[in-house]
Structure formats: C-alpha cells, structure tokens
Image (cartoon, helix red, strand yellow):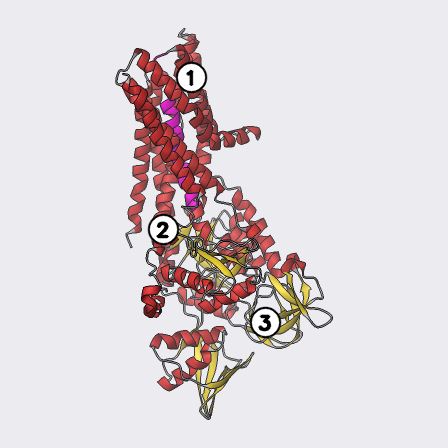
Amino acid sequence: MNILVFLIPVALGLGGAGLALFFWAMRDGQFEDLEGAANRILIEEEEDLAGRADEKKEVCR
Amino acid sequence: MNAPANPGVPRPAESLDSRFVVPGMRCAACIARIERGLLELDGVEAARVNLSAKRVAIRHGPEVDSEYLLGALGRIGFEAQVVDLESVPKDDGESRMLLRALAVAGFGMMNIMLLSVSVWSGAGGVTRELFHWVSALIALPVVAYAGRPFFASAVAALRHRRTNMDVPISIGVLLATALSVHETVIGGDHAYFDSAVMLLFFLLAGRALDATMRDRTRAGIGALLSRMGKSARVLTEDGSTRNLAAEDLEKGMVMLVAAGEALAADGVVQDGRSAVDNSMLTGESAPQSVREGDTVLAGSINLGDPIHVRVTAASSDTAIAGIARMMDEAGQSRSRYVRVADRASRLYAPAVHTLALAAFAGWMIAGAGWHQSLVIAIAVLIITCPCALGLAVPAAQVVASGALARRGLLVKDGSALERLAEIDTALFDKTGTLTQGEPIAAIGHLTPEQKAIGLALAQSSRHPLSRGIATAVEATGIRPASPTAVAEVPGRGVSGLLGKVPVSLTRGREDRASLATILSIGSESVEITFTDPVREDATPTLDALRAMGVRSRIVSGDRDAAVEALAAELGIIGEGGKRPESKLALLEALKADGHRPLMVGDGINDGPAMAAAHASIAPGTASDVSQQAADAVFVGRSLMPVVAAVAIARRTMRIVRQNFGFAIGYNVLAVPLAIAGLVTPLIAAIAMSLSSLIVVGNSLRLAKTGSRP
C-alpha cells in the first residue's frame, strides 16, 4: 500500500495542473473569440498571394 | 496562429485603445481585410478583430482620432460604430464564474470518486480512513469554491423570506459535507463527500449551460440607442464648429448634420434642404424630404445635403428617448414572469424539507439515536436534491436553442423559450417584418443601356430608392456606364452627362400610391416603380400559425390603405396608422383580456410593444432597440423561423414536463429507500448520475427537430 503515497499526490497533481491550465486559458482570453479562431485558419498569408486578394472578397457575403 | 496582428511593435507609452462595433463582418476574409487595412494606416499600431462580438480593438497613436478610424473602416467597406470603453458590458462575468466553479467541481469529483470507488469495493481499516481524510481535504475547498453561486443565491432568497431551488441544494450540500467530516473524524463507515461534490458538478453544468445560452446571443446584439447620433457638430458664435456629445446638447444650439449622419437631437431645420430616413422611428419606408421649418427627430438619418438643425429637444427629452422610457416601463411586467424551474421549486423545496424533517423525527421516535437519524435525514436530502430538476430545464432549453439557431433563429434565454411556448395571438408589424423592408425596383422593362446608366447614377447616391435600383441592376450582371459630372440634388435626384447627353434619375409623381423614380436619357424618360415585396413565405407562415391555434393580425405605423391592402392579401385583420403608444395600448388590452400576445416587429416604434408583449421576435435587419427588446432574432428572408420558434418552444416545454416527470418519478422510488435507511453513498451516487443521464438523454431528442423542415 506504500505505492499510494506516490499515486495519490500524482493523481492530484495532474488534475490540479489541468485545472490551473484551464484557469490560465480563461484569464488569458483564449475563449474570447471562438468563432474568430475557427475562421482565422482560413486567412491566407498576404505575401504569397497578393494577386488573389480580389478573389477573396467574393467569399465574404 | 492567433497572435495579435503585429506582435513585434512595442507599445509606446502614449498610445490609445479604441473599440468599434462592426456588424457587417462575417467571415475570415472580413477579418483579414479589416486587420490589414487598418494596419496600413499611419498611427495604427495594432488591430485585432473579435468575430464573435463583432468588434475590432485598435491601438493607435494620439494623432489618430476615432472619426478618422471610422472613415478608414468605411473605406475598407464596413460600417462601424464607436464603442465607449466604459460601456463595454462586463456581462460575461457570471458565466465565467460558473465555468470556473464547474472546472473546480469536476476536478474534485474525479479525485474523490477515485478514492470512493476503492472504499465501495471493500477497502477497510486504515486505508479507508486515509481515503476519507484525503477526500475531506479535497472536498472542503472544492465545496467552498464551487458552491458559492448556490450559497449566495440561497442567502439572498432567505433574506427576502422566500425560498428557491438553491435553498435545499445549499442545505443538502452543507449538511452532507458536515456529516462526512464528522464521520471522517470519528472513523465511521460512510462519507458523503462524493455525493456532495457530484451534486454541485451536475447542478453547475445546468447553470453554465443556461448562462452560455444567454451570452451567445447577447454578444451579437448591439447597444441600446446606438442608432441615435452619439455626438454632433455644433456651430459656435464665431462661425467655427466643435464636437459635442449627444447628452451635452442644449435647446437652441445649431447642429451641422452631414450627409449620412444620424441626428443626435430633435430639432427644426434652419438652413438647407435634404431628405431624411425616418424608417426606424415611424416604420414608413419612403424617405421624407425636409426644408427650412420642418421638424426632424433624433435617430433619423440625413440622406441628402448637409443641413443646419436648431435643437428643440436634446438627450432625454427626444422622441426616441421617450420611446426607450416607454419600453423600460413596459418591460417591467415581463421581469415578473416566474421561470418554470422556480415555480416547480416553490412546491418542491418545502416538500423536501418536510420529508427530511419527518424522517429525522420518525427515526428519533423509533429510538434510532440522533446520529443514525441525522444520517438518514441527510440521505433523504441528498437523494431528493433537485439534481435532475436542476438539469431538466436548462438541458432541454439549450438543445432547443441550438436546434433553432440552425434554422436562423437566435433565442436570448430560457425564459424567452418558456414564454414563446405560451403565446396564443401574434401581432406583426408591416414594413420590414411581413415585407422585406427594402424597396425592390421593377426593372424588367428597361433596355440594357438604360440599366447601365441607371446603375451608374444610382451608385452615386445613398438614397434607399437608388440603392434599390443598384441592387436590382447589379443582380443582372450589367456593368455601370460611366457618366461624368454626376451630382445629387437632395429631394430631386441625381443627374450627370453621358458624352453630351444629359441623364438623370428624378423622383416620380407625388400622387401615386407606390414609390417611383423617373430615369431620363436626353429627351426620353422611363418610369421605374418600386415595391416592398411581402416575404415569400408570409402566407404559409400565417397558415401554420393558425394551424397551431395562434391568431395573427397586423399592427403598423404605415398608412391605413397600404396596411389594409396587405391584410386583405394575407387574409388577416390589419390596422394602420398606429403610433408607438397606441401599439402599446393594444398589447395591454389584449393582455387584459387574458391573451398572451407575441409581437413581431423591427422598428424603434415597435420597441415599447415588443417589451410589453408576452414574447417578441425581431428580424435581423431590425433596429438595435427592437433587437434588444426582442426575445429572439431571426435572420434571412424567410418568415418561417417565427413558426419554428413557437413550435419548438412548445415541444421544449413538453420535454421539460417529461423531465420533471422523470425527476419526480425517480424521487418517488428513491425516497422510500432513503427514509427506510437503506441508502448508502454508493446507491446515492448511482441514482443521482442515472437520473441526470436520463434527463439529458431525453432533452437531446429535441436536437432532431432541427433537421426536419
């Protein structure tokens, strides 16, 4: 049963770390703009595609 | 990938932050255009778009002011409004707090369960005591933190000598924790930490769902009265102008109102001629031409040339502010509405307390000793704690609001769904609600050349009729001609030269019932008429409402003749010429007769009626005020979401009642066991999870209604 001395703190520590990470994410504003985050991956980098800038406007209704 | 748009620039000490609402942004391309367009400007250090809130935050140097930024946003192609940094609502505080509490309760629940399972499976002696102690160490801070929303609400209710759902929850959780601590200290068999924390977790899940649903729609809806001009340029005695905030304007001042600006106060035109768009105030779609001596109201938009307006009523005395006050008062009755869950708990809480007390007294009389009697009484409290009840309503409502959102209808909160389910009469505004609200030009009889010229002229004006022509011609794919010397004369029209030929778009004859414009090319002229078409599915919508037992009628601020024609076409009663206060009076009369009216409207003039109605729905094109007053907002050209709203709301209430049935049925089975003293923590935990799962599963059935037509 001595293993419990390690296992219980490990379980608590992992859970606590997850909790701390969630708190940090909320304070840092990670959940401020969920829709924006989903859409930002669709933005193409301007440098490589300067010529296609006009096409992109069509996408936006 | 989501780093601020230009993270490399260090922040100078004197830079300022400004925020703007940009209602028109919808997709990734908009984000990219706004952020890149703004960053190209001198003086702008950073720009960050928040798509969910439709806001853009700009950090800029002191040499750039908000008007310049508004202009820049306009050139990029987006209409924007300044957000006062102070007025940015901190309304998401509640849901954040609930989410944090939920995370803490989840953490505690997992760890305590881990320990409890080994106790249930037979751990004994020192191990059990150790596990109880560790559980206590986790549970005490978790209960203290995650229980705060319930404790606070229970204390507030008790202070007002009322009781709500949170009172039995708080008593149950606190007693269970206290008893478990006692058991741990004396080395007893059973500790209820797992039940207490699990109860908090399930209940917080329900609360967090409820709060998320409210926030989701609130984020998209703009601030009250943002239509009214926020500031005005005022002429001073020495002839110069200065900017004054709307609330600092005084009677007698002279405002200079540029084209496209909203008026910040009521007044009389002193100099200049123009046309104003009054549609937000009166519901009348045609622009009104104004000249010296005419009265203009705050909130209307100057469409033509700059005018000088002498202020006759400012800030809280304006007509629009009066409407806002009326809405405020009308909305009071709605805040007295009691949510289904609270109505249930009014009966439920006393019953549970009586039962627990009776169990305690009964076992004391039977001679079980105070310790065992208390354990049994607490078991009764825990097992009856409205875990399933707490989830019964929010789970169903969140699933239903998701189903409605897929059909283009955003419901503001759960109370709105409950009220929508109860309505028996529907009142529709005409312009912008039953109709599309934008004049559509009939251009079928024009030649392609005429269309090209008409488009070129129409594009240079912001008059609603010009926009109607431009939209109609653009849809045919015709490119505009390129006339020169294009000029707009307010109240008359647009003119220009095509080569040597004079071309113009001028207003039609006054005496006609419908709106019309005349397009002249040289000596030829052709008339373009406009209609404000009824939404395509207006008739099926009204039929579907009738089939559900809801009677419909039209109340409009528009002319009687126009309203009666439409009412006859749709086969319902219609009344025109209604002012905001007469609409409100009609609503009150209906309510006094015992009806539960639904108001569907879009203008500021509908605001008070919408606030007073039992439930209200606004189209997405409605004024901010109406969207604010409405319980739900629908987007798109279809009117069917109104029917879907009522139908799904009614279905939701059926599911909620079933959920209550399950929760009560479960109690009927479990309470005798608890009173008989047969409930161990294991049974309590299983029963609680099972009843919650059944309730959530039953609610998920609502999701299917979203995919059906």
Label 2 and label 3: CA atoms lie apart by 41 Å
Helix, strand or loop status at disc 3: loop
In the picture, measured across the screen, residue B450 lies left or right of residue B489, that is: left
Residue flagged by tag 2: what amino acid is it? Answer: Leu
Residue at position x 36%, y 46% in the image: B400
Q: Where does the image place residue B666, in percent across and percent down from the top left?
A: 33, 27
| Residue B159 seen in the figure | yes
Q: Which residue is mark 1?
A: B181
In front of the other: B73 or B375? B73
Residue flagged by tag 3: what amino acid is it? Answer: Ala
Q: Where does the image place residue B356, in percent across and percent down from the top left?
A: 43, 19
Mark positioned earlier in the residue sequence (2 or 1): 1
Helix, strand or loop status at disc 2: helix
Do the residues at discs 2 and 3 belong to one chain?
yes
* Residue B705, placed above or below residue B204: below
Q: Where does the image place residue B605, in percent across and percent down from the top left?
A: 54, 60
In front of the other: B530 or B11? B11
Label 1 and label 3: CA atoms lie apart by 72 Å
Crowding at dot 3, Cα within 10 Å, few <14 / some 14-19 / many 20+, comes out as some
Do the residues at discs 2 and 1 belong to one chain?
yes
In front of the other: B13 or B153? B13
Q: Which residue is mark 2?
A: B404
Do the residues at discs 1 and 3 belong to one chain?
yes
Which label number is shown at residue B258?
3
Residue flagged by tag 1: what amino acid is it? Answer: Val
Mark positioned earlier in the residue sequence (2 or 3): 3
* Residue B419, placed above or below residue B8: above
